[in-house]
Image (spheres, rainbow, N blue to C red):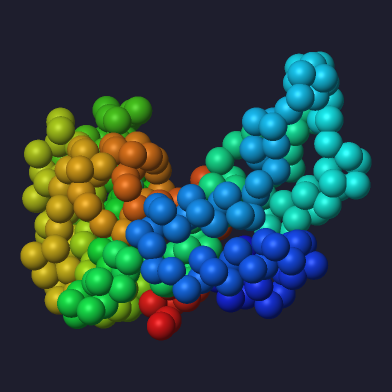
Amino acid sequence: MEYLSLGKILKEYREHLTEHEQEELQELRKQPLAFQEQATALHRILFKEEEDFMLDSSADAKDRARGINPMSAEYIERVNAKRAAFGVKPLSKAGYSTDASSRLFSEEVVRQTKNYKELLELKRSGKKQVVYVDMDNTLVNFQSGIDQCSAEDQAQYRGELDNIPGIFSLMQPNEGAIKAYTWLSEHFDTYILSTAPWGNPSAWRDKLLWVKKYLPEAAYKRLILSHHKNLLQGDFIIDDRDKRGVSEFQGKHLHFGPDGEDFKTWKEVMSYMKAIAKS
Ligand SMILES: [Mg+2]
């Protein structure tokens, strides 16, 4: 996946923009608005076609209700070519946007442009963006713990393996996880944010011991255990699931592992976070 800043869009994606749109983007580039404000303004400039239906005549509205986009074929082709170039879903046959991809794209451009109010204020005060990193199946290789448990324990705790006493102390780090966390802790205000099973008190202790063993300095007093990750304030959360409040987290979720699209490995996470850290 390619990450685009406003500058890069203006330089390399001109063919997809009208002259008026280019001027609007130039204007926007100079304004350090708040993150969400800037994303909304950018979305409105880049994806105006999503509001076409608001100006429908009654004949247009009838077309749309029958699943026909009343705009010209040439126009539809142009906007969909632009959407494809940006990795955004094409309009539906009736000319509506069908998911949040254009909004998420706009937010990502703001993040990469790094000219939004909150970030500038943070930098001015000498602070760093906040990153949370999950443990199970993100920092930690969960399966490596299971593999070391006795067959009896595995049979007894089938379907709830995370309740095996002591299992968390046996787990190994995922490939590249320790190096990545250490790097993150140097460039961001980084914390471990994990959930420990309610029915397995030893897991709460084992998670602390695991952090002390593998990240004694980088994560010193930076372990947070919670079932409500959405309550934490921050800019990024690296997590293999969207449960335990992750889907409501206010910042960006880097969906780690096989279920995620862009962040299947720590290598991919690092390449994204390095781009974010670069000033
Ligand atoms: Mg996890």
Q: Quadrant of residue 95?
A: top right
Q: Where is residue 188 in the image (x, y as percent from the top left)?
A: 27, 72
Name the image quarter holding the N terminus.
bottom right
The answer, for residue 134, to whether it is visible in the render is yes
Q: Which of 134 and 148 is in front in this view?
A: 134
Q: Where is residue 74 in the image (x, y as percent from the top left)?
A: 90, 47
Task: Classify residue 246 by image quadrant.
Answer: top left
Tell me which residue sits at (60%, 37%) in the image.
Answer: 99
In this view, the residue in front, 4 or 157, is: 4
Q: Which residue is drawn at 39% across and 68% down?
A: 32
From the viewer's perspective, is 153 left or right of 46?
left
How many labels sit on residues?
0
- Which quadrant of the figure contains the C terminus? bottom left
Q: Which residue lies furthest to the right in this view?
A: 73
Identity of the residue drawn at 36% across and 73% down = 180
Tell me residue 82's x, y (percent). 75, 56
Q: In which quarter of the image is residue 61?
A: top right
**Residue 255 screen position, x and y as percent:** 45, 51
Q: Is residue 151 visible?
A: no
Up the image or down, 185 lies above or below 140; here it is: below
